[in-house]
Amino acid sequence: MIIRKSTPEEARRINELFAICFEMPMTNCPADPEQDDATHWVAMDESGEMMSTFTISDFTVRFDGQKCKMGGIGGVATLPQYRRSGGIRGCFQEALPDLYQRGYDFSYLYPFSTGYYRKFGYECCCQGWQWQVNMGMLNPPKGCGTFHLVEKNHPQKEAIQALDALWEKKYNMMVIHRESDYDWVSKSDPAVKQEFTYVCYAPSGAPSAYVSFRLANEPSGRNLHCNRLCFADKSGFQTVLALFKSLAADHAYVKFQTPVNTGLQYQMPEWSQGAVSWELLASRGMVRVVNVQRVLEKAAYQGSGTVTLEIQDPQIPENNGRFAVCFADGKALSVQPTGALPDAVLTIPAFSALITGVCGLSDAEGYLNGLEIRNPTAPLSQVFYRKPLWIVDYF
């Protein structure tokens, strides 16, 4: 088996594999392969037949207030006749050390199987809530704000960008968007595309939220499905609810996703009679730390202290070993390799989940596979604690 990066001439075949394996029309083949800035890994058999492939796209994400380079894994595909032949495994074995050498901090993916990707160091990361709300039973306060439809002659792109920027600063793993990521706003055509985006404004005139949705005819009625939602604060969320209330005469339920935020449940005026239901999105993607030392240097800590961590990473040799972390006033002063006894031993999936803030140490202890606490008196809970997490981009 031959594992390597693809050539520009192989772009079409890569997209053909994706279309075949995911049973969808081939619509994402680059018009000009030379302008395709993603990295494509391929596994070939000895005859030169492409067996497997995946794509790594570059993103800048937020982590503890720092900008970090993240490799988003997508387009994971193997032709049926070559499955279970080790093609994807081989690609990961080559790609992960390459990411380290090229200066990446994290990698992220959306799994078909969490168990499968744990073998390569990934662990469940962002969680969220999936809401279904009876629109007729909403009762938002009056005067919380106004909302305006996004159309070609009223794009309101700057307001949307400003709202995204708030979440990009607040949540770990949020992608920091580029100007080109907002092409969808200028192309908004609700009358033709039947996708409706509204920007909400506070009484002061400041943008407070935006939401995009489509009609979905379902057994429970004419419902609205949201594919974008961002709000600045309580008032913005209430204005979104007021928008939904204004559409209640023609629709039964609205479905949307939010980051985990316990306070949002108190914004619902009614919980009985099927007014609201929600469920936890247990895994909105999986994260992997690519460079342990650099992530420890960028991480935010609570207070001051010193810990020694032993990391076990079968794919990236540079991450294996013990790291002495000295931090003060919430920031790392030094992160150095050491021969000292570790306060905790972590596999790379466990470390990836804990350092990004999926849960606190007390919740993880005894439940998170790959975590072994050797020194209970060490200030490990000041290193590993729950943090705001969310991601809205797919790749």
Image (cartoon, rainbow, N blue to C red):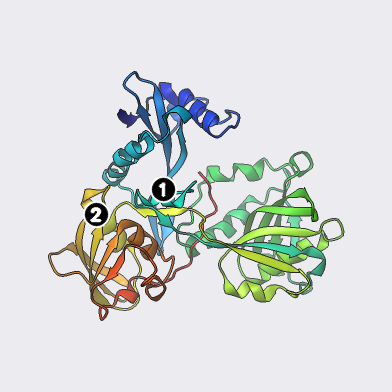
Residue highlighted by disc 2: 319
Left/right placement of residue 177 relative to residue 47 reads right
Disc 1 residue crowd, few under 14, some 14–19, many 20+, Cα 10 Å: few
Query: Which quarter of the figure is the N terminus placed in?
Result: top left
Residue farthest to the bottom, as pictured = 377
Q: Is residue 20 above or below residue 176?
A: above
Question: What amino acid does circle 1 point to?
Answer: Tyr
* Image-quadrant location for residue 249: bottom right
Residue highlighted by disc 1: 116
Q: Is residue 214 above or below residue 236?
A: above
Q: Is residue 290 visible?
A: yes
Residue at 34% across / 37% down in the picture? 91
Q: Earlier in the sequence, mark 2 or mark 1?
A: 1
* Image-quadrant location for residue 279: bottom right
What is the x, y in percent for residue 183?
60, 42
In the rendered picture of this protein, how many numbered marks are placed on residues? 2
Q: How far apart are labels 2 and 1 at the CA level? A: 21 Å
Residue at 43% across / 58% down in the picture? 62
What is the x, y in percent for residue 323?
21, 64
SS under mark 1: helix
Question: What amino acid does circle 2 point to?
Answer: Asn
Along the viewing direction, whichever of 272 and 336 lies nearer the viewer: 272
